């Protein structure tokens, strides 16, 4: 929208422009409700965003040009999604009066890295320090996973429940929540390229206690499901061996519930079609190979992604979080072209149904 370009340049909008922008902000009822926008509050929110946008746009644009370029411009997603989301998280942190743990679930390619990067930029302008933690950072060491594979040869790759150091995650989140002054938190970092792509912990990063932790991962917040649901499980859970593996991974998910209990909020970046994750992975590998880098074949990608889906299938473990009243606090739909679709609170939709 032209009015957003004007705001970036520090120009003052006319009253008709403000009215048009306010109408656009309220044009999707589910999204407006999810972010607490009402006809009574939209004017104050518009004023807040107008003051914020010129300050955050330069660093967002720099990140966008260097690393992202999914949309033509970051302006609309910034105004429509990222700023209202950051303000919502900031308000939740203010009310909590202690460090807040924001869980973010998203499959590969959903945009978790982009989201956490932009949220950090906006939240810091709002006066809150942020720390990003990925569930990938909690992987067990290479040697520990080698031993795990000896015990269970089915765990040939990292990723499923059982391949993470849950106790280490609990220690980190509890330290953050304790909010002790002048405390440095040791955050593990994981190098996916180590040992020929098997990956290993590269060390620990010392970071100050943050106001907000953005804790992201492909099954953050996922809940165990009733075992009888595996009797009609979707592909690629096809064979009795597949069902046995899926049921055991479901059981191991119980070990992660204390970690999810530390979450204050949970949002889901929900793909319009979960199969997009495999498609986007293939596109990324094709691009890497075209540039002369190593990459997996389509067949290898199918096997790799199916391994994750056999462990925790999106239809069984992600979908309930997006539809049930006791699911996620917020759902952001990601379309095939990487733009945002429906944005809603499952609890609100349940009440309206």
Image (spheres, rainbow, N blue to C red):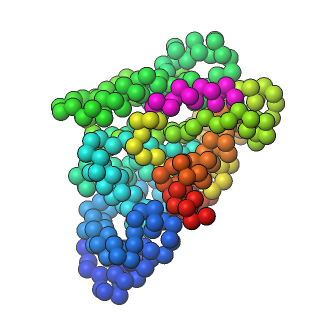
The image quadrant that residue 314 belongs to is: top right
Residue most toward the right? 239
Residue 155 visible (yes or no): yes
Q: Quadrant of the C terminus?
A: bottom right
Expressed as whole percent of the image width and height from the top left, the position of residue 334 reads 56, 57
Q: Quadrant of the N terminus?
A: bottom left
Q: Is residue 320 left or right of residue 13?
A: right
Can you say whether 139 is above or below 70 in the image? above
Can you say whether 63 is above or below 220 in the image? below
Q: Is residue 256 magenta?
A: yes
The part of the chain drawn in magenta is 246-259
Residue occupying the point 25% across, 45% down: 97
Residue occupying the point 21% across, 31% down: 180
Q: Pick the residue in front: 40 or 16.
A: 40
Residue occupying the point 58% across, 30% down: 253
The image quadrant that residue 84 belongs to is: bottom left
Q: Pick the residue in front: 89 or 192.
A: 89
């Amino acid at each position: 929208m032209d009015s957003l370009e004007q705001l970036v340049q520090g120009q003052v909008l006319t009253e008709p422009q403000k009215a048009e922008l306010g109408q656009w902000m309220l044009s999707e009822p589910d999204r407006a409700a999810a972010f607490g926008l009402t006809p009574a509050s939209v004017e104050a929110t518009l004023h807040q965003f107008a003051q914020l946008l010129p300050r955050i746009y330069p660093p967002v644009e720099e990140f966008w040009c260097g690393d992202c370029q999914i949309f033509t411009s970051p302006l609309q997603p910034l105004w429509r999604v990222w700023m209202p989301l950051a303000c919502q998280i900031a308000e939740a942190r203010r009310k909590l009066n202690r460090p807040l743990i924001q869980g973010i679930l998203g499959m590969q390619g959903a945009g978790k890295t982009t989201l956490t990067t932009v949220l950090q930029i906006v939240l810091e302008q709002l006066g809150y320090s942020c720390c990003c933690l990925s569930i990938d950072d909690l992987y067990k060491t290479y040697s520990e996973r080698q031993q795990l594979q000896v015990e269970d040869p089915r765990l040939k790759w990292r990723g499923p429940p059982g391949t993470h150091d849950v106790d280490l995650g609990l220690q980190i989140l509890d330290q953050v929540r304790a909010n002790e002054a002048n405390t440095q938190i040791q955050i593990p970092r994981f190098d996916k390229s180590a040992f020929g792509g098997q990956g290993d912990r590269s060390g620990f990063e010392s970071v100050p206690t943050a106001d907000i932790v953005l804790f992201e991962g492909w099954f953050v917040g996922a809940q165990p499901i009733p075992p009888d649901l595996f009797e009609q499980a979707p592909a690629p859970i096809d064979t009795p061996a597949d069902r046995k593996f899926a049921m055991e991974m479901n059981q191991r998910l119980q070990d992660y519930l204390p970690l999810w209990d530390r979450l204050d909020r949970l949002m889901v970046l929900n793909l319009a079609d979960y199969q997009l994750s495999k498609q986007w992975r293939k596109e990324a590998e094709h691009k890497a190979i075209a540039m002369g880098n190593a990459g997996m074949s389509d067949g290898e990608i199918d096997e790799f992604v199916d391994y994750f889906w056999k462990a925790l299938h999106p239809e069984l473990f992600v979908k309930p979080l997006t539809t049930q009243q006791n699911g996620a606090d917020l759902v952001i739909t990601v379309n095939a072209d990487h733009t945002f679709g429906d944005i809603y609170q499952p609890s609100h939709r349940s009440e309206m149904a």
